[in-house]
Amino acid sequence: MLPTSAIVLTVGLIFLFFWTPSSQNLHIEQPFIIILLILLTVLPAIIVFIAGKIIAIRNRHSIINPFITSILGFVASLLSVSCFVIQIYWLQIPIYLLKSPFPKFTNSKTFLIIILLVISFLLCKLALFRIRKKNDETLTAKSYFLPDIKLMFIPSLPFLVSLLISDTIDIMPLNIRIFFVTHNYIYWFIIIGIAIFMFIKSPFFIRRIWSARSLESGEIRNRILSMAERNNIKFGDILVWNMSGRRIANAGMAGLLPKSRTIFITDFLLHNFTLDEIETIIAHEFGHIKMGHIPAYIIFSFAYLSISGMLYSLMLPTINHISSNETFSALLSGVFIVTLFFVYFVLIFRFVSRIFERQADIYAVRITGKPDSFKDALMKVAYVNQIMIRNPRIFKIFATHPSISERLELIDKAVNDQNTVRNYNRIAFNLKRSLLLLFIVLVALWITSRDLIFPPSELHYEIGRQYAIEGMIDQAIAEFNKVVDLNSKSDQAFYALGLLYMEKGAIIEAKEKFQRALEINPKNAMAFNKLMQLQEMENKNGGVNEAIKQN
């Protein structure tokens, strides 16, 4: 499951990915832009600090309700992302970075803008630290901040790698660049490959995010290995998370392949729970392995790429119809994809996750035969981690796990009602079936929706841009003409044609193209400025010619 810090960063990256430079001039002085930039970075933390102060005063003599702290954390994340969107879409901050003296690797330079969101989010975390500390006296600043900083690395790595690959391709010879433009589905395979690698190597990354050591030999390890052998569960190792003295009782598993698959358990749980309780908790993690939940999560994640790409392609004409302003259209595109991301991963994905958690609970009861120990373990986990026994109704739809009360009731049903066991006994996916299904989905998507996902007009636009970079003006003009044949409403293509004709010295043709761009998008400031420049040149030449005639 993606933690809050990773979700915030992912949403920020989506908005940054869709950002498009505005063709309109921003009439704000640079010193004022710097002031606004700083203000928008710290404003969320100021608001959260004030709200947290009020909450702390009202709960001076009692523990603050975890539900309230969760709501405040959500508001902090929302404010950070909102201010970041204002920074990039209104203040157009990426433009200033792109004007740096390093002309290459523009995509990777744009990625650096995400630092603004990271700073804003961490400042909000700092504002929330006092509230968290009140509920957990063992909490230290290092243990509070460091995991979030490291967890932000998870979504940023594949994004950054794909950008570096894209920038590397941009500095290659023309024929290689055009090959990747005409075969742009290769980028999707690169992203999928990176994601699969991350799934396979996730224990490697998690082990370095949290300090972890291999569980030493002894009765606990022997009991876990014996249980795994009896139930044909294959995994690589059992690691103990070092929580640096914090009271956190948790366990988890990560890794796609049997040899890389790893079971994690916190040191507090290891030292404060009974052997039977630890056994049932690890059996729950074995349930995730046995029921094929990791392959199912992979398919679910990759399906998002396909579904979001298809829906966005269908929605794009409507977005462009709503606004002719390219920056606002880019913002609407980002909002649409983020909405899909929220619905898919926060609502649907977590609904599926709750089903998987119930499956793992029933599996743990079945293979250990110790329902009472498992129930005791869940109650201890709730007490130590300050988890509410019964979740508020609205909180349930956002939760990755059923409430503790629901899980306890399910365990009782699993013991007394075999129908309940049968309802949750179906394996989600096995690895071979998952890979086959993924291949079928990708092939079907390619056959039915290639033009939706990779519009021909955009392909010709990018090819024309590559020719223009190389100074091959006639070839570039031919490609941009193909764009306007396919999409007569592309003001950017007409603007590009105007620039090319202007470079050739064909002033009349250049004026026609700039005028057409303005007819499509009257707010295209770049086309307007070029048209005014041509008009001034004509007036100047006309004045010179008139003076020659008079002489």
Image (cartoon, rainbow, N blue to C red):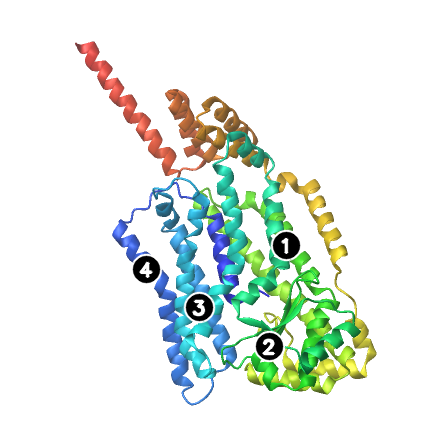
What residue sits right under mark 3 in the picture?
76
User: How much space separates mark 4 and mark 2, taking CA atoms?
Assistant: 38 Å
What residue sits right under mark 1 in the picture?
196
Q: Is residue 226 above or below residue 161?
A: below
Q: Residues within 10 Å of mark 4 (few under 14, many from 20)?
A: some
Q: Are marks 3 and 2 in contact (CB under 8 Å)?
A: no
Element under disc 2: loop
What residue sits right under mark 2 in the picture?
250
Residue shown at the point (75%, 69%) measured from the top left: 233
Element under disc 3: helix
First in sequence: mark 1 vs mark 2 = 1
Tell me the kind of residue under disc 4: Ile
Q: Is residue 421 above or below residue 189?
A: below
Q: Position of residue 73 (x, y in %)?
A: 47, 71
First in sequence: mark 3 vs mark 1 = 3
Tell me the kind of residue under disc 2: Asn
Query: Which image quarter: residue 255?
Result: bottom right
Tell me the kind of residue under disc 3: Ala
Give the left or right position of residue 222, taking residue 314 as reference: right
Residue shown at the point (71%, 72%) measured from the top left: 286
Residue 455 in view here: yes
What residue sits right under mark 4 in the picture?
38
Q: Position of residue 514 (x, y in %)?
A: 40, 29
Q: Position of residue 26 (x, y in %)?
A: 33, 46
